[in-house]
Amino acid sequence: MNRDPKDELLALRNMGPKSVTQLVDIGITSSDQLIELGAEEVFRRLYFRFCDEHRLSVNYLYALEGAIKGCDWRLIPVNRKAKLKALIKDLK
């Protein structure tokens, strides 16, 4: 039986249907790929693919980090959030 790659991604914390659809669109089809690339690289790819269509928020980046770490995005340490927020500033 073939599993939809979205199912594995939807099982991750902080990931909803819209986020998962966007991840699959940029070629992320497993949690292993997400973890291997890391939140910064995945967000960079999302930004360059979707920046004209959707406003990608810092909370989305936090959600990716939380999905990778297996925690709620609100539990990401403040110093890590600052580094992630700096990435968005650098992309703009």
Image: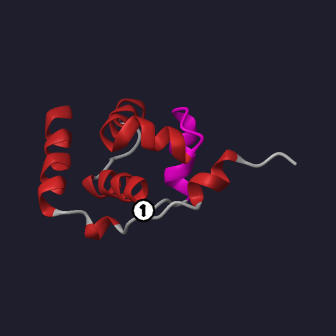
Read off the residue under disc 1: 70
Residue at 34 percent of width and 44 percent of height = 39
Q: Is residue 21 above or below residue 13?
A: above
Q: Quadrant of residue 50?
A: top left
Q: Amino acid type of disc 1?
A: Gly
Q: Residue at x 51, y 33 (%)?
A: 26
Residue 22 lies in the magenta stretch: yes
Dot 1, how many residues are within 10 Å of its Cα: few (below 14), some (14-19), or many (20+)? few
Q: In the shown orientation, is residue 4 left or right of residue 68?
A: right
Magenta part mainly helix, strand or loop? Answer: helix
Q: Residue at x 14, y 62 (%)?
A: 78
Q: Position of residue 81 (x, y in %)?
A: 18, 56
Rendered view: 87 above or below 1: above
Identify the coloring: secondary structure
Which residue is nearer to you in this view: 39 or 18?
39
The total of numbered circles placed on residues is: 1
At which x and y percent is residue 49?
42, 31
Residue depicted at 44% across the width and 43% down the height:
35
What secondary structure is found at the residue carrying circle 1? loop
Residue 30 placed where, x, y %?
Answer: 58, 43
Magenta extent: 17-30
Image spot of residue 34 (x, y percent): 47, 42
Q: Is 21 in front, or is 51?
A: 21
In this rendering, position of residue 31 left or right of residue 1: left
- Residue farthest to the right, as pictured: 1
Residue 89 belongs to magenta span: no
User: In which image quadrant can residue 47 be found?
Assistant: top left
Of the 4 image quadrants, the one containing the C terminus is top left
Establish if 54 lies above or below 65. Answer: above
